[in-house]
Amino acid sequence: MSEPIKIDPDEFGDVIPRVKSDLTREFARSFLDEIRIAKPEFLILDFWPDVNYGYSVMENGAIITHNSWSTAKSPYFHSMRSERYRSDSTPNEFFKTWRLAADKFMEFIQENLPRTKVIVHKARNVAKYEAKDGTIKEFSSWPFRMNKHWEKMDDYLISEHACLLLDVINDHQLGIESHPWGKLPVHYSLDYYKRFLVKLTRVILEDKAKS
């Protein structure tokens, strides 16, 4: 929710078109206009990028997601000094900035989309995954340890801004190596997505019943 950053897309370097498009939208903050135009009835948020990447403050004052797979490898990122903040290594600084950004986003929703309901998707990093040979293996422990910070973010939006909760995860949830998007602690076995749709429908119907 910081100010837009003017940048030539070529400064993102040699990335695939989808990534360049995503970065261009993030830097320009154009997704805010997209939401305002779309006027969604419900808007789902989850904070995996916030937990996994944190953010960097650039030498010129710009604040960007510290995406280690794209932004942090770009010529733009390496053209100036920066300082990274993360919920585990710099929690006080991180959460001070994060809360301000969360409040600012919710103010944007209230001012521009007063009929839109925000749903917080309570996803989490899982500890284990099913390998392609059917065996159960463990991820490194760091993502799982980050869940306590993720929960803190979810709780803030729900308690301070009365967002709806979509809670699908359980203690036995596995990741899966054969996931279409690859092996990650948030790429779950496919049964998760069926439960997601069922619970999302329930959350929406229950909210409409109260209206």
Image: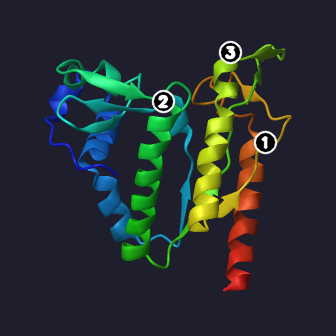
Q: Which mark is residue 165?
A: none
Q: Position of residue 149 (x, y in %)?
A: 62, 37
Q: Position of residue 182 (x, y in %)?
A: 59, 24
Q: Which residue is mark 1?
A: 191
Foreground pick, 43 / 120: 120
Label 1, residues with CA under 10 Å away: few <14, some 14-19, many ≥20: few
Element type at marker 3? Answer: loop
Q: Earlier in the sequence, mark 2 or mark 3?
A: 2
Give the mark toward the camera: 3 or 1.
Answer: 3
Horizontally, residue 88 falls left or right of residue 205, namely left
Horizontally, residue 51 falls left or right of residue 17, namely right
Farthest bottom residue? 211
Q: Is residue 15 visible?
A: no
Q: Which mark is residue 86?
A: 2
Foreground pick, 129 / 146: 146
Q: Quadrant of residue 48?
A: top right
Element type at marker 2? Answer: loop
Marks 1/2 in contact by CB < 8 Å: the verdict is no
Q: Position of residue 102 (x, y in %)?
A: 46, 55
Horizontally, residue 83 falls left or right of residue 103, namely left
Q: Which residue is mark 3?
A: 140
Label 2, residues with CA under 10 Å away: few <14, some 14-19, many ≥20: many
Farthest front residue? 92
